[in-house]
Amino acid sequence: MKKFSVMFFALVLALFCAACGSTTDDGGDEVDTDSDIQSDNDTDTGDTDTDGDTDTDTGDTDTDAGNTDTEESIITQIQKGRIPVNKEVSTKCVVTGIRYNQDKEDNYKNTSIKGLFVSDIIDKAQPYSGIFVFIEKSAELGTYSVGMPLMVKGTYVEYLEQFSQIQASEITILDEDVKVPEPAVVDPASVATPFVVTGKDQNGYDTYSPTDNHGADAEAYESVLVKVENIEVTNKYLGFSNFEVTGGLAIAPTIYRYEGNISKGTKFESIQGILVYDYDAFRLAPRDKNDVVTPEVVVTSSGIKDIQSDSGDEKTVVEIKDAVVISPVFKDEYNDATKYTFYVSDGTTGDYSGLYIYKVSSDTAIEKGDTVTIKGLAQKFSGQWEVSGVDNADSIIKGEKGTVPGLVKKAYKDLTDADKGTYFEITDELTVESVDEEFNNVTFTNGMLIMPFINKDKVKISLKAGDTCKVRGIYDVSHNKKAIIIVDENDIVTK
């Protein structure tokens, strides 16, 4: 963030010193002729300042070739506001994180490198020891990696007058053996920007906005690799895939989108990453799945019926063996992991025989008719039981081809909870009462609701009030409403 008070003080001091005839640099601080902040390898450029005097030093470029513990690095000077904005700088550093450009239309797939989070070359992260390096024309994937030593030259700027960064003009990869600093362990509340409820969205869910009550240490750790320990989820939804943990700290998908369980109360041994400042809030951004450490979990063997018929809300990590995929499969690729969403059955119909599987990883492609063994978190979400991906137990093992249970015909009024997860043809002739065009849902005059499975754009519902039709689909609960989940465009036959 921009250091208004420090920079304002520096400007006043500069004007005062100029009036007194003192010798100062561009930032208003007195020049220390014995300082090692400027590199011994700098050449005499003889640059001319705006006042017409000719310097005999390196001009406007500060260099940092590796300072001792008694000196402040260029990164630290920037973050403390001791270097003026728009000054040319140069510093040796190590990459601690990478920010990517992403294709939002392709599941946020990384397309190129937008910039780098870098640190002073030190053993353990310290306050003011990190900064973001912006790459104006972007870099190809693989050009830089975490742990890579660099010499960065560029201009120090305050992006939107809030976020300190170096706009790189030249980045040189160094042939040196360096290590990423150990993360600084911090109190989450000390670096957090708390969020508050500011209203409701169109579905009645709370919406949140950040306050300006930033943690006391937040600015000191801006762009620094930090770790918080022994925390739990306090709010699973702050919006835009952010969630909140102990101390009011937002966990953001700035670098990596965590796909594990974030139900309220979910515990983590630790989460580490870069403390970023985005959209008026300090947020912790994990860099990959290894930055999120969950407690060891006990995996229990379970049948689909045991899960689907449970009337409680207890969350358990389970293994389901020899289930059959009974629906089309949605593939979600993000952060180089492939996760699959679909329905499975134990091979029968009725009697709680089917279950929703949500974003569980597989090394091989999954399709309708496959037999699978699944490990994941069994939980009730919006009234619907599901097994979802979770760290330490997130996998699908593909087996032989199985037999998909046949279609069952039944009147809507005769459906019971035990029918959840079974593929039905509803024998009623249905009349449309209303259509929710945004979510592609349809309500019928008998109270029955139909929803498209997974992607509303792949299963179009071209109905309007008053239309009559016959419907097939998987009976389940979705968003706390009993519904027929249509899985194919042919599941709706209009009259």
Image (tube, rainbow, N blue to C red):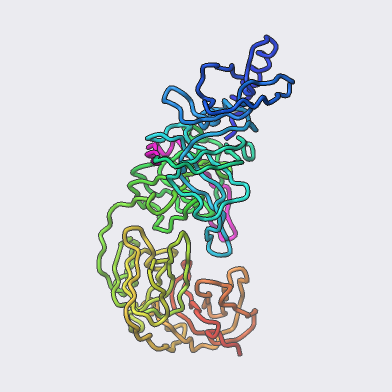
Q: Is residue 363 visible?
A: yes
Q: Nearer the viewer, residue 215 or 112?
A: 112
Eyeballing the image, is 397 above or below 99? Answer: below
Q: Quadrant of the C terminus?
A: bottom right
Eyeballing the image, is 493 above or below 230? Answer: below
Q: Residue at x 36, y 52 (%)?
A: 266
State the image coordinates of residue 88 (x, y, percent, origin top left). Answer: 62, 32
Relative to 217, 29 lies left or right = right
Q: Quadrant of residue 460?
A: bottom right
State the image coordinates of residue 208 (x, y, percent, origin top left). Answer: 55, 48
Q: Quadrant of the N terminus?
A: top right
Residue 204 drawn in magenta = yes
Relative to 141, 353 lies left or right = left
Q: Nearer the viewer, residue 423 or 204?
A: 423
State the image coordinates of residue 30 (x, y, percent, origin top left). Answer: 59, 16
Q: Residue at x 50, y 74 (%)?
A: 453
Q: Nearer the viewer, residue 481 or 330?
A: 330
Query: Which portion, as a residue range, is magenta?
Result: 179-206
Q: Residue at x 46, y 51 (%)?
A: 243
| Residue ranking furthest to the top | 20
Residue 307 drawn in magenta = no
Q: Quadrant of residue 409?
A: bottom left
Eyeballing the image, is 104 above or below 229? Answer: below
